[in-house]
Image: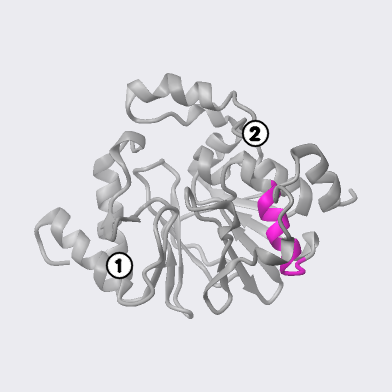
């Protein structure tokens, strides 16, 4: 199967840059090898990891963000086929919305946790925890730029699995049943997804409005702190700025606050 060109994909989704010069929008490096594709704005963060066999995208933003992500790759002279894999931390609208378009453009293999597979294949099964938000959420998914498309993942992973990118899969359920975080021990960083957020300068558990299992979400923070807290310095999030130093200590402190015990 031939790979669709960037131009062909953008023709079906619309220009992402609205007349701006592509060269003026270069993704932001967090640490060597890890970039945040900040061209899509600050509502949600999408990351690009460079490794020996090419590049891996971690999450894909909203459906409307796919063209901007493709433009960001063009700006860094990264061809579509160089994106070998797309890892989805969880199947929320703002983290997997652009997945169908980006998979089509890159032909990358899609990776998610075994439990999250059903939500990628049947996106509307994922609902906010708060009943009052469910109808507005459904209406949102009917709007242009927010329409979810099902995707069948190519690879299913489980807790503790080692990935070719150098990541260790950390199953961190609560926000969604199959949520995963990604630990890179060699480079000492953690991609937390929505297992944690860093809003207004404060490290937090995921928002309760969209978290159906808050107890498991708290246990996932404890797991990150107790089992892996000595293995990372940098933490990046789906929401909020990165913590570049002492990230493990910060997560341990949060876990201590949650459980009122030392971890």
Q: Which residues are magenta?
A: 67-78
Marking on residue 150? 2
Image: 121 above or below 112? above
The reply to whether callout 2 and callout 1 are in contact (CB within 8 Å) is: no
Q: Which residue is mark 1?
A: 227
Front of the two marks 2 and 1? 2
Farthest right residue? 2
Whether residue 257 sits left or right of residue 60 in the image: it is left
Residue 31 at x, y = what percent? 50, 77
> Which residue occupies 35% across, 54% down?
197
| Element assignment for label 2 | loop
Q: Position of residue 212 (x, y in %)?
A: 33, 34
Gap in Å between the C-alphas at discs 2 and 1? 34 Å
Residue 156 in view in this figure: no
Residue lying at 15% horizontally and 62% vertically, measured from the top left: 256
Q: Nearer the viewer, residue 198 or 90?
A: 198
| Residue 108 in magenta stretch | no
């Amino acid at each position: 199967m031939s790979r669709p060109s960037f131009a062909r994909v953008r023709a079906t989704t619309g220009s992402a840059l609205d007349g701006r010069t592509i060269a003026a929008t270069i993704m932001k490096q967090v640490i060597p090898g890890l970039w945040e594709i900040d061209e899509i704005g600050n509502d949600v963060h999408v990351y690009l990891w460079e490794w020996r066999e090419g590049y891996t995208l971690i999450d894909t933003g909203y459906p409307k963000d796919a063209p901007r992500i493709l433009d960001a790759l063009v700006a860094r002279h990264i061809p579509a086929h160089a994106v070998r894999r797309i890892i989805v931390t969880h199947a929320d609208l703002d983290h997997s919305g652009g997945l169908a378009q980006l998979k089509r453009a890159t032909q990358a293999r899609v990776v998610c946790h075994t439990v999250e597979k059903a939500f990628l294949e049947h996106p509307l099964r994922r609902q906010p925890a708060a009943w009052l938000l469910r109808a507005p959420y459904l209406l949102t998914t009917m709007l242009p730029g927010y329409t979810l498309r099902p995707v069948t993942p190519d690879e299913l992973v489980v807790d503790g699995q080692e990935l070719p990118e150098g990541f260790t899969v950390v199953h961190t359920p609560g926000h969604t049943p199959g949520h995963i975080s990604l630990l890179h021990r060699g480079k000492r960083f953690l991609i937390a997804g929505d297992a944690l957020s860093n809003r207004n300068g404060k490290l937090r558990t995921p928002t309760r409005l969209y978290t159906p299992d808050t107890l498991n979400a708290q246990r996932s923070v404890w797991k990150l702190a107790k089992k892996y807290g000595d293995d990372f310095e940098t933490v990046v999030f789906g929401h909020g700025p990165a913590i570049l130093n002492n990230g493990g200590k910060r997560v341990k402190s949060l876990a201590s606050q949650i459980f009122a015990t030392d971890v």
